[in-house]
Amino acid sequence: MPIVKWEPFGEFDRFFDDLPSAGFGNMGDMAVDLYEDGKNLIAEMNLPGIDAEKVDVSVEGNYLRITGRREEEKEKKAKQFYSKEIRRGSFERALRLPEPVNESKVTAEYQDGMLRVTLPKLEEKKSGKVKVVVKK
């Protein structure tokens, strides 16, 4: 009988490779781009096949929270799936914002499956010299 080297972490990796990816939070379709564009922070997220009315965008403190729901389709029993990777059901994504934003002026647009959230940054107070009168 040949001697086979046992690799315990290889067994661990193979265990997770065999699990369905949708059940373990595959964030491929939940990816968010966050970047600065002048006086705004911009967050973009692909949400294909989701009704815009089922998407909720909110700013809570230093976090942008995007929640929604992709409806489960009624499946016909005649279908025999070989692969089923499209995630359905509710989702939530929270991002820590790198700078304070003006929460009352945040806007969101949803077009062609792309959600774009514009977050105006708070204007910094200009630090200048302020003369303070000392009373005697």
Image (cartoon, rainbow, N blue to C red):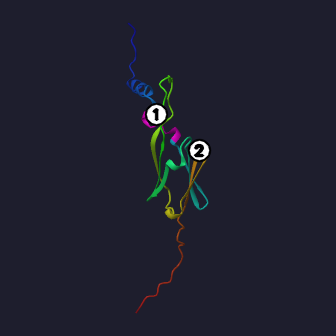
Residue bounds of the magenta highlight: 21-29
Closer to the camera: disc 1 or disc 2? 2
Residue 67 percent coordinates (x, y): 46, 48
Q: Which amino acid does label 2 sit on?
A: Gly
Q: Quadrant of the C terminus?
A: bottom left
In the image, what residue occupies the spot 40% across and 14% down? 4
Residue furthest to the bottom in view is 136
Residue 61 percent coordinates (x, y): 43, 59
Q: Mark 1 points at which residue?
A: 22
Residue 22 percent coordinates (x, y): 46, 33
Q: Name the residue under label 2.
A: 113
Task: In this rendered view, identify the residue nearer to me: 5 or 16.
Answer: 16
Q: In the structure shown, which secondary structural element does the residue marked by tag 1 occupy?
A: helix
Q: Please tell me whether residue 28 is drawn above or below residue 56 in the rendered image.
A: above
Q: Please tell me whether residue 83 is drawn above or below residue 125 in the rendered image.
A: above
Q: Which amino acid does label 1 sit on?
A: Ala
